[in-house]
Each structure stands twice: as structure tokens, then as C-alpha cells.
Amino acid sequence: MSALSALVGTRAARHTVLPGFGPSLGFTIVYLGLVVLIPLSAVFFKTAGMGWSAFVETAFHGRVLAAYRLSFGGALLAALLNAVFGLLVAWVLVRYEFPGRKLVDAMVDLPFALPTAVAGIALTAIYAQNGWLGSVLAQWGIKVAYTPLGVIVAMVFISLPFVVRTVEPVLQDLETDVEEAAISLGAGRVQTFVMVILPALLPALLTGTALAFARAVGEYGSVIFIAGNLPGVSEIAPLLIITKLEQYDYAGATAIGTVMLLVSFVMLLAINLLQRWRKSRMGG
Amino acid sequence: MSKNTSMPTHSRRPVSEPALIRWALCLLTLAFLGLFLFMPLAAVLAEAFRKGTEAYFSALATRETLAAIRLTLLTAAIAVPMNLVFGITAAWSVAKFDFPGRSLLMTLIDLPFSVSPVISGLIYVLIFGLQGWVGPILADHGVRVIFAVPGIVLATIFVTFPFIARELIPLMEAQGREEEEAATVLGASGWRTFFMVTLPNVKWGLVYGVLLCNARAMGEFGAVSVVSGHIRGLTNTMPLHVEILYNEYDFVGAFAVASLLALLALLTLAVKTFLEWVHRDEIAAALR
């Protein structure tokens, strides 16, 4: 691997006099390979070893399908909810002035910093039958904790910062000239927002939503406490991997892991394409 | 951070919404964030102190809780420096040089962000477990990785892998390489260039990356849960200890340990905000 980087290095070195390209790239690739790529490849080797029919049987079994439905469907709903509210939060933080704005802005990063297990038990305490909100909602017959609704609440929490943090900088750099032009040409505020502002924010908004979805799909720590984990109803796919591992069913765990990894890779590809689109938009 | 690059002047902005709508949007935002951010934090504290301060501190002072705190500190003390060295090296090669496959490398560095924590643990079980690739060989030599501390450290390194590189790469990219090239042409060695020119330029991004990396290292749950085996006093980190106490209906204990982790999160955010505030001109200049 370092031979490869040295080869690449001689070509790149022509562009700059800076030293250390070969060693730093070599170390980066070796460390990346040892810590990330080789371990991840184990999932595919293990799956390849179990044969196609066994793979399909485990990875697309009825209970597993229900878990995918909850993980992917819940993550999609959570991401969409965050697309709407994230845009709102970013808008209010960038455009309006109100007391405590700095504090609120800083707190948006909380889900990145707060351990997921802490978020999980806190949300469960709030939405349980005797919790602050759970007891109120129970009067209307709404149950959140230990239902699929609880799974979505936890997913909204952990993916909350993504849309805000991707939209915020774009909104800040948005020139108001275009808006002024739209207004002076007779557009209403709503029309200006939909026809002028939203299209400019769209790439960032989609990137943030995709990031939120990718994060929520694989989430485990915050979800398992509030989910109740009823098989077929409120059981997420990552939990099934753990259940299979506890039964020493490594092949079964890996088969589900493969499906989830493939979805992650597709999401990563989509996010990269979105970001490329964003850059080309900003350049033009 | 890019907030400081533009200069939002409110007087220059005649286009805005009616006051009523502005207020409504502000209130809606605060209600949403209050529900999802502030209420969980308040719930952690309320539950931890439900039976008074005495119960809170005695819940924290148990032998097993202290062992969990020690293991969490040890794990972070290994994982963060390793990823710090990696992050700086990776940022140097990716941000200061052009080469084919550069964007692919950047995508691969980000990979652990998009992998489910549970899978991050699973991959190490497949390699170091007793049925894994090298697990049996290591077991013959009396080395245990899975259900032991090395597995916890490895899974933590995987999960926190991109944090520091992620912070540094855009910052070092934005600064270009003219300053470093000048230093090199004037005869400074590579290390000297790095320590005297590059490092001072990116130090706040670096500090923030380390903080985030540390917060995640201490708080990781899913990946660590898969490889730990949950042996009390031995392979139990703080987040895992929260789960054990919670499942045993020791709610005061669970929320007491959780409150320490929440405090860590708040400290991380506070230091980040403070750094951004104190060095806003510097950060803006660096990004320009």
C-alpha cells in the first residue's frame, strides 16, 4: 500500500514543494485499512460464506422484514419531520433576533454530544405513562413510549442537528438582493420564499435530510429504551443483530448487517452526489 | 463557523416578515427545541435527584460505577490520541496535496459515520471473536479481545475515527498551502512548517475535533455494547452501566450516571461555543 502511495506521490509532488506527502498518505491508507476497511470487509466475507439461499432466508425473514420496515420507515419519517423543523430552526436562528438566541444555537448540537443511552432513558422517562408528557398524552389515548411512535421520537432527537447545520451556513450566505428584486417586481413574501429562497436552499436541505436519515436508520442506543422492542411491532433492525449475536447466530447477525451496510453505502453515495450538486450550484 | 464570514446587518434588510409571523415562527422553534432538546436534559436531572442529593451521591459512589468511570476514561485516553494522530496525518495528505482518488479517500474516511453502531461492533466480533478470523489464534496465546477491554477500545476507535479528520480537512483546505510553501522554500523542515505554520492556523478546529471525538468516545453505546459482554466492574463503560442500572429498575442510579454523561456533553458544547466566541475574528480570518 505504501508503495502505491509513493508511486502516486511522485506525480503529485510536482504541484507543490511541501514535504511529507508519501508518508502521510501511506499512514492514512494503512490506518484506514486496518481500522475500517478490513474489519468492514469481514461482513461481506462472512455473508458470502453462507450461500445465497441461506442469506435470503435469514435476511428477509418475516420478523426481519418488519424490523427493516420500522427502521427505514421510522427513519424516513424522522428525517422528513426534521427537514421541516430543521429548516424552521435554521431560518429563525439566522434571520431573527430574540433573547437567548446564542444559547439555543449552541444547544442544537446537543444530540451530537449527548450519549445515546442518556437520550434514550431521558425520552423514555418523559413519554412513559407516568412521565411529564406521557401522562398528558395518555388522557387522549395516545401512547408514545413502547410503541413505534416512541421509535420515531428517539430518531427525531438524534438526527435533529443535521438539517439545521447544513442549511444554516447557506442561509447566512444568501444574498438578499435577489429577494429584494423579487419583492420589487411584485412578488409576495410567500411567493419569494417558495420561488427564490427555497430553490437556493434545496441542495443543502436535501443533504441534511439524507444525513439525518442515514443516522436514524442505524440508531440503536436511544431507540431501544423507548421502543419496548416487541418483535414485529417495535423492534428495530440493529436490535435484531444484537439478539442474533446473543444466540451465537453470527451468520444471521451478519446477513442483516450486510443489508443495512448496503443501504448505508447507497445513502453515502447519494449524499456525495448531493454535495457535488451543491458545490456546482455554489460555484455557478 | 462560517457564520462569521458574512456580515448580517439587519438594517440592510428591508425584506422581512410581519412581526406577528416572526413571533409565531420563533415560538414554534422554541417549542420544538424545548420539547426535543431541553426537556430530555431536564428529565435526566429531575430523575437523578428524585430521591434527594444524598441518594444521588451514594448512587455514584458504588464500586461498580467507579469502575465504569475508570474504564470510560481509559478507553477515551487511548482512542482519542490515536485518532488525533490519524486525523492530523490524513488532513495533511488530503488537504495539502492533489492526487487521483482524493475524493474517494475522503469518502472512505467518513465511512464510519454512516455505519450503524451495532455493525461497528459486529465487525470486530467477526474478526476477534472465538469463531472469527484471528480470534482462535489469539485465544491460544491467552489474548482476549472480544468481551474484554481491547475490543471496547477498538470499537470506540472505529466509531470516533472520522471526527478529527473531518474538522481539520475543510479548514486546512480553505487555508491553501501558500504559507506552508513559503516556509518550506525559506528552508524550514516539514515538522517545523507544520508546528509553526499549519498548527497555529487550525488549532481551534483541532480542539473542537478532539472535544467531539472525546464526547463520542466516552458516550458510545451500541458498538461497545456488542463487544463488551457487560461484565460488571470489568468491561462495563459508563453508558453500558446506565443500561444495566436502568434494566434493574435502579432509576436513581441510572440517571445519576447519565447526569455525569450529560454534564460532559454540556461542557463540550460550552467549550465549543466559548472558543467560537473568543476566536471568532481569527476563525473568520482563517476561513477567508
Image (spheres, coloured by chain):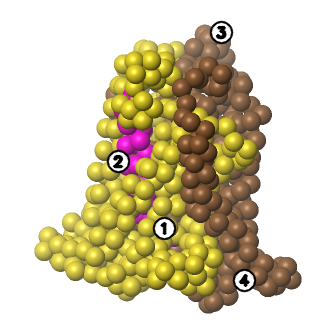
The residues bearing labels 4 and 3 have C-alpha atoms spaced at a distance of: 62 Å
Give a yes or no on whether discs 2 and 4 share a subunit. Answer: no
Residue A153 - label: 1
Q: Are marks 4 and 3 in contact (CB under 8 Å)?
A: no
Give a yes or no on whether discs 3 and 2 share a subunit. Answer: no
The residue depicted at 63 percent of the width and 76 percent of the height is A132
Amino acid type of the residue tagged 1 in the rendering:
Val
Q: Are marks 1 and 4 in contact (CB under 8 Å)?
A: no
Residue B20 in view (yes/no): yes
What crowding class fits label 2: few (fewer than 14 Cα within 10 Å), some (14-19), or many (20 or more)? many
Q: Which residue is mark 4?
A: B252
What crowding class fits label 3: few (fewer than 14 Cα within 10 Å), some (14-19), or many (20 or more)? few
The residue depicted at 77 percent of the width and 34 percent of the height is B278
What crowding class fits label 4: few (fewer than 14 Cα within 10 Å), some (14-19), or many (20 or more)? many
Q: Quadrant of residue B160?
A: bottom right
Q: Which residue is mark 3?
A: B186
Magenta span main SS: helix
The residues bearing labels 3 and 1 have C-alpha atoms spaced at a distance of: 58 Å
Mark 4 vs mark 3: which is more N-terminal?
3
x and y percentages locating residue B152 in the rendered image: 56, 68
Q: Which chain is brown?
A: B
Q: Colour of chain A?
A: yellow
The residue depicted at 61 percent of the width and 38 percent of the height is B19
Q: Are marks 3 and 1 in contact (CB under 8 Å)?
A: no
x and y percentages locating residue A279 in the rendered image: 39, 28
x and y percentages locating residue B126 in the rendered image: 38, 70
Mark 1 vs mark 2: which is more N-terminal?
1
Q: Which residue is mark 2?
A: A268
Is A15 drawn above or below residue B115 in the view shown?
A: above
Q: Residue furthest bottom?
A: B248
Of A8 and A189, nearer the camera is A189
Is A147 drawn above or below residue A26 in the view shown?
A: below
